Amino acid sequence: MHIPDGILSPQVWIAGDVLAAGALAICVRRASRRLSDRQVPLMGVMGAFVFAAQMVNFPVPGGTSGHLLGGVLLAALLGPATAGVVLFCVFLVQALLFQDGGLTALGLNFINMGLVGCFGGFYSMRAFAGRSRGLRRDVAVFVACWLSVVIGAGLASCELWLSGSAPLGPILIAMGGVHALIGIGEGLITVATLRFLLAARPDLLESLP
Amino acid sequence: MNRLVVAILLIALGTAGGLSLMASPAPDGLESSLDEMGAAADKPVLTSPMADYQAPFTLAPWLRKTIAGVSGCLIVFGLVLIVGMALRRRSRLEDN
């Protein structure tokens, strides 16, 4: 879902970059307030993991593909603000070194694929499951993932429409349809990864706000 | 904790350098939707050294992708670690 350069109008991507810069500043302030020493190495390796997972596109019926976004996964382990900082680093490296997502679209890509999952996903997960464990948490994580991918795709559609690159109805239907399927992949990968990590370290979530 | 951190890094490197070779080559949801709309992107504003996850060497494409994936993983790891340590230092300053 990485938006490239040259498809958003300047008004849209400049507004997106300004919004994203403000949101990133808030993430940095919030993250620095509650970061513990043991979270720093976890941030590093989870950033590397999300970068790696985003390289592995899985096939989706209909001749397209999708990959993990990772916002809900990172937020569940690190809290939403720290997760936002980590994901921004991933998108920055992708845009600069790998031409994955345009540099001008970095702000909106960070919002669509990062902040929606980190904050929206995290709080919807908390609303559904609180701090409970087991199946209830798995279901809440899955739903949060699915919603964050579909909402992110909806936002991207609106940005393309505002830019005059696509009509609103058709792009919403096309993007929504594909991402309703990609969201299932996001949910399955996130639930499996969280289960694996929490089986190894059940106390991993305890420091979360 | 340290063992888990090392394990996650190794899994990440294996995923970026190995599993990524099995990634679906089909266009992603955004690309296919834009194709459907007949919309096309202009030129990117900068040319990345490893565009499309291909390291800039005259090697087999799979090896170029493995090198790109592994180096990208290590760069993200390093960058996030530096950012994390800077945030941690800030939080200590605020504590005092």
Image (tube, coloured by chain):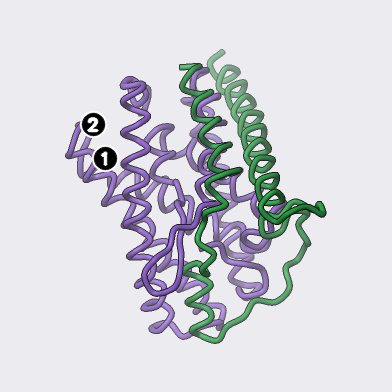
Chain colours: A purple, B green
Image-quadrant location for residue B17: top right
Q: Are marks 2 and 1 on the same chain?
A: yes
Q: Quadrant of the C terminus of chain A?
A: top left
Residue at which label 2 appears: A131
Find numbered disc 1 in the image and state the secondary structure of the residue it sits on: helix
Q: Residue furthest front?
A: B60
What residue appears at the point 62 percent right and 80 percent down from the top-left corner? B40
Q: Position of residue A165 (x, y in %)?
A: 56, 82
Find numbered disc 2 in the image and state the secondary structure of the residue it sits on: loop
Q: Residues within 10 Å of mark 2 (few under 14, many from 20)?
A: few
Nearest the eye: B74 or A22: B74
What residue appears at the point 45 percent right and 61 percent down from the top-left corner? A66
Q: Which mark is residue B74?
A: none
State which tag comes first along the sequence, 2 or 1.
1
Q: Position of residue A62 (x, y in %)?
A: 39, 74
Q: Check whether the beta carbons of the residues at disc 2 and disc 1 lie within 8 A of each other.
A: yes
Q: Is residue A52 left or right of residue A62?
A: right
Residue at which label 1 appears: A126
What residue appears at the point 34 percent right and 64 percent down from the top-left corner? A181
Nearest the eye: B96 or A209: A209
Q: Position of residue A60 (x, y in %)?
A: 39, 65
Q: Is residue B50 left or right of residue A102?
A: right
Amino acid type for the residue under numbered disc 1: Arg
Q: Residue furthest top?
A: B96
Q: Residues within 10 Å of mark 1 (few under 14, many from 20)?
A: some
Amino acid type for the residue under numbered disc 2: Arg
Residue B24, above or below B88: below
Residue B73, above or below A9: above
Residue A197, above or below A69: above
